[in-house]
Image (tube, helix red, strand yellow):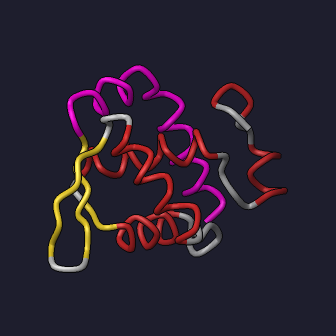
């Protein structure tokens, strides 16, 4: 499920986001404030009223990918990693802002 075909029905039926959509939502959350992977999982769960709770097996690989392509930077804090949006990540998010806002609105709606 790519950016172009994200819809209410797909989300309700699958209760999950496709990889591209999850990455975009993570960038939107990082634009609000730097975060650890656990904080991103919690934020998504909170925004959906517990309806959507992504697994660490979805979130952490997405964060690693965003770091690898230069959309997020990481700073070690002991054994944890804190992710921050980069300028390249902000530019990508800005290009896809309407998609990110739609997904976040849907998360709130289903919650």
| Residue 25 higher or lower than 44, as above or below | above
Instruction: State the residue at coordinates (41%, 53%).
Output: 64
- In percent of width and height, residue 15 lies at 73, 61
| Residue 9 higher or lower than 108, as above or below | above
| Residue 11 higher or lower than 96, as above or below | below
Q: Quadrant of the N terminus?
A: top right
Does the magenta portion include 108? yes
Of residues 37 and 16, the one drawn nearer to the viewer in this rendering: 37
Of residues 87 and 6, the one drawn nearer to the viewer in this rendering: 87
- In percent of width and height, residue 69 lies at 38, 35
Tell whether 12 sits left or right of 89: right
Of residues 81 and 92, the one drawn nearer to the viewer in this rendering: 81
Q: Which residues are magenta?
A: 86-111
Instruction: State the residue at coordinates (22%, 55%).
Output: 74
Tell whether 28 sits left or right of 84: right
Q: Quadrant of the C terminus?
A: bottom right
Instruction: State the residue at coordinates (61%, 46%).
Output: 19
């Amino acid at each position: 499920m790519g950016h172009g075909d994200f819809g209410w029905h797909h989300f309700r039926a699958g209760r999950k986001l496709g990889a591209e959509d999850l990455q975009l939502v993570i960038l939107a959350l990082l634009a609000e404030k730097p975060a650890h992977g656990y904080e991103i999982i919690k934020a998504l769960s909170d925004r959906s009223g517990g309806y959507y709770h992504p697994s660490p097996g979805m979130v952490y690989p997405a964060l690693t990918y965003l770091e690898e392509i230069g959309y997020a930077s990481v700073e070690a804090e002991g054994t944890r990693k804190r992710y921050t949006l980069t300028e390249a990540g902000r530019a990508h998010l800005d290009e896809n802002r309407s998609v990110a806002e739609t997904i976040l609105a849907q998360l709130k709606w289903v919650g």
